[in-house]
Image: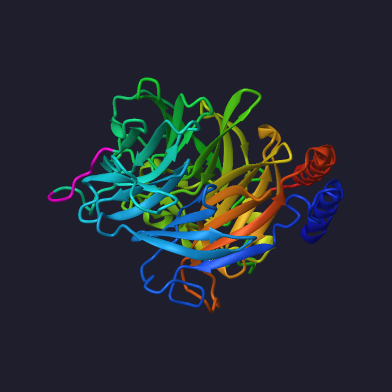
Amino acid sequence: MLHTQKLVLSSALAAAFSCAPAAAGPLASLSQLGATFFHSTAPGGIAGSAGFAAEIGAYDSLTSTLWVTGISGVDVLNVTSGGLTFNSRIDVSAFGAVNSVAIYNGIAAFAIENSVNRELPGIVQFYNTNTRSLTSGIHTVTVGSLPDMLTFTADGSKLLVANEATPSSYPMGGSATDPLGGVSIINMATRTATTVNLSGSIATTGSGLRSGLPFNYEPEYIAVNGAGTTAYVTLQEHNGIAKLDLNTNQFTSIIGLGLKDYSLPGNGIDSTDRPNPAGSVIALTRQALKGAYQPDTVVAYEKNGQTFLVMANEGDAQEDDGDVARASTIIGLGLTGDAGRINVIKNLSSAGNIVTMGGRSFSIRDTAGNIVYDSGNLLEAQAIARGIYDDGRSDDKGVEPEGVALQTIGGRTFAFIGLERTTQGAVAVFDITDPANSSFVDMIVTNGTRRPEGLTTFVKDNMIYLAISNEGAAAGNVNNPLMSSALYTLAPVPEPETWAMLLGGLGLMGLYARRRNKKKTA
């Protein structure tokens, strides 16, 4: 059925795009890999890459280059006609460890943590994308502890930095402390930073927020509304999102994201990494469990003047796993044997209310935190159907949706969701043009790489691309056991006269997918 669906969708899209310069329709070429670049000593890689980890990528349209972070530095890759070739490497190891990169108008910003003691303030450095050297004037700005992600506002006037502020060691106390997490707001005109930390005095709303924990809020990812007035900051471990007013540079609220009910239709999961009694290793069933959504990446987009937030519900524990345990080890939960192997959040779980990490899905929420759409167990069902589900992760967080990228194609909005824990790299594609009626389109299986961390889409020479930064490779990969960047061709940019036909084909695709979803059971 899945193969038939793909053929039907591709045929409809190709017909809608038959007048376009390229033969393939939008998203009909999902399996067409343009290139894979291995950041290593293997063929096609870079000598001296030991320890490099491909994490986050950013595209510079001025130089047609893809910039990929890797802890010790940033690799700059040339993007040619569907290919990736090495340009240069920027080594930042003398300053610390780089966690993220963002680019705006020829300026690349690097988030760099203090590699000696990450509890100390980190820095952001600015590089000229043409010379690949530090910019003139002020090129280094001090920010908060462990800057983990950064993003420019739409007009480029501000750069926002998520300071995760994770302790250097556990247990805390003695020489280890827990610094305050927050956001640094850099004024790009003056290259000065205002750091705003999260504290217990900020008003909280919603439910399921893990407040009062022995560790402070740890900002993970930032999305900004189109007007550049409000930032939304995921607090992954705490199952919340913080709202930051960019006019006053103050946090206004922290929203608890609630719990996902795995006993409801369409939400069934496989909660054990052991064969079930029927002998089937993998089975999605409705269970008396709940999940804290705990989103990693968040991306904002606008529909009819309203801002919506797309979140990848990966799940995460305190770094030393001190806040989680197998259900069978917690007295009173009543789960034993294989059923008790599920990892649960200790301070949220009680008899009749057993809470696991992550939502194993992606969600679309409004800015008040209300769920508009959730993919249920569709991501795991699709991974199972393609033979790439990793049953060894069933007792933890499943496929672990992590990265998100959005792209408008022919007037419709598509979401690309990276799955970190599958046996082959996988990126699910959804049409989210109508947030409440979002529909599954297809799944990219990268065949040879795995653990997609960062996703980015861009347009070059009238072609739309998806770049994937992969932290690992699948078993049997003869190139590099870790670390690669992959480039996929998504679609040509439509000529104006083909838009009507294009939208017609996409409409058929969305209708078909929604009809299939309505037939879906738990």
Position of residue 116 in the picture relative to residue 319 (left or right): left
Q: Position of residue 154 (x, y in %)?
A: 50, 32
For the point 74% across and 47% down, the residue is: 520
Residue 175 counted in the magenta span: yes
Number of numbered callouts drawn: 0
Q: Position of residue 267 (x, y in %)?
A: 62, 46
For the point 66% across and 24% down, the residue is: 304
For the point 78% across and 47% down, the residue is: 516
Q: Quadrant of the N terminus?
A: bottom right
The one of 341 and 434 positioned closer to us in this rendering: 434
Residue 158 counted in the magenta span: no
Image height check: is 66 above or below 103?
below
The one of 377 and 10 positioned closer to us in this rendering: 10
User: Do we see residue 273 in this rendering?
Assistant: no
The one of 212 and 17 positioned closer to us in this rendering: 17
Residue 386 sits in which quadrant? bottom right
Q: Which residues are magenta?
A: 174-180
User: Do we see residue 467 in this rendering?
Assistant: yes
Position of residue 504 in the picture relative to residue 355 (left or right): right
Q: Main secondary structure of the magenta part?
A: loop
